[in-house]
């Protein structure tokens, strides 16, 4: 008796006109984005490029030219110093604040939490100008200390937003058991809570590092000639007077974009963006 083998039905892609329109807009946006980024990347390696689809030739000398012309070694060193200082101070301030918000109930707690959210919800330029005015008045702006102080305003809330869920997930009975065994406050934080908080602290540090390297407004308003980070130096390279090779500026832009992409990939490895979005949505206004 012959066995009849049924063939699987072919799947047909069916969609409503509105869904096809949405996907078409998304595809159009991605194609244009790829075109803009690709043109800058190709230009950074091109020799001459006038009126043709591709440059006349390709070279990597523009990266060496940009490195020397714009003093990128000093710029990268300043960026690294500022970013690490902001990360360190933000973690030292944000972790204890996160513990208090996660473990303690006190009058005005929602107002305090909402105040920490304001620097994230508001555009940096709205509070950056008055903040820079105060820093210049007291002599902090125009150097690295002013850049660090300005970047702490949004960075500390980022640490709090990242660390508070981690602390809330730790069972408070662990701390009670440690106290019952004779552990003091210092021993409890260093030996009990510390190892449990390492993933959260690492996620918060990477998130702050990404934001500090990419922060333009606050750094631009408070930086001096010797305290410019990479993104501010890129802006000055594009807008300063004089004649500069476009390929050299494009090479600098590629260096900055590559740095940000690497930091974002590392950050997404440890930080779930939906966790932060959900945290903001769950926080009611006072």
Image (cartoon, helix red, strand yellow):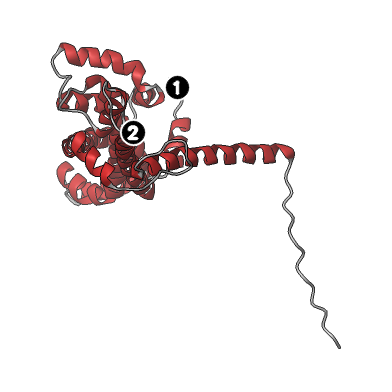
Please say if 248 is above or below 173: above
Residue 153 picture location, percent across and down: 28, 25
Please say if 137 is above or below 186: above
For residue 139, side relative to residue 37 (left or right): left
Judging depth in this view, the residue of 203 and 23 nearest the camera is 23
**Outermost residue toward the left in this view:** 139
Q: Quadrant of the N terminus?
A: bottom right
Q: Which residue is at 74% across, 49% downward? A: 14
Residue 94 picture location, percent across and down: 26, 34
Q: Which residue is at 28% across, 13% downward? A: 130
Instruction: Quickly name the residue at label 2.
Output: 246
For residue 53, side relative to residue 184 (left or right): right
Q: Quadrant of the C terminus?
A: top left
In three-dimensional space, the C-alpha distance between marks 2 and 1, rounded to whole angstroms, equals: 48 Å
- Which corner quadrant of the image does residue 250 belong to? top left
Instruction: Quickly name the residue at label 1.
Output: 285
């Amino acid at each position: 008796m012959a066995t009849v083998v049924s063939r699987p039905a072919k799947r047909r892609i069916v969609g409503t006109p509105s869904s096809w329109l949405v996907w078409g807009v998304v595809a159009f946006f991605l194609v244009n984005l790829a075109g803009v980024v690709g043109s800058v990347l190709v230009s950074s390696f091109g020799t001459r490029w006038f009126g043709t689809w591709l440059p006349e030739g390709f070279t990597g000398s523009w990266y060496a030219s940009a490195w020397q012309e714009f003093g990128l070694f000093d710029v990268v060193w300043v960026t690294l110093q500022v970013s690490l200082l902001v990360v360190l101070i933000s973690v030292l301030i944000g972790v204890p604040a996160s513990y208090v918000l996660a473990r303690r109930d006190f009058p005005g707690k929602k107002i305090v939490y909402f105040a920490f959210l304001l620097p994230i919800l508001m555009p940096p330029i709205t509070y950056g100008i008055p903040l820079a005015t105060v820093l210049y008045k007291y002599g902090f702006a125009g150097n690295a200390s002013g850049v660090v102080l300005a970047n702490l305003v949004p960075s500390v809330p980022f640490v709090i937003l990242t660390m508070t869920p981690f602390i809330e997930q730790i069972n408070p009975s662990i701390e009670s058991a440690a106290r019952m065994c004779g552990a003091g406050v210092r021993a409890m934080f260093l030996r009990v809570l510390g190892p449990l908080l390492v993933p959260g602290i690492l996620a918060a540090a990477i998130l702050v590092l990404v934001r500090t390297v990419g922060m333009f407004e606050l750094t631009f308003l408070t930086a001096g000639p010797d305290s410019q980070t990479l993104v501010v130096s890129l802006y000055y390279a594009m807008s300063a007077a004089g004649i500069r090779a476009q390929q050299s500026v494009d090479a600098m832009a590629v260096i900055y974009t590559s740095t940000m992409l690497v930091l974002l990939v590392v950050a997404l490895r440890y930080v779930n963006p939906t966790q932060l979005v959900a945290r903001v949505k769950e926080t009611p206004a006072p």
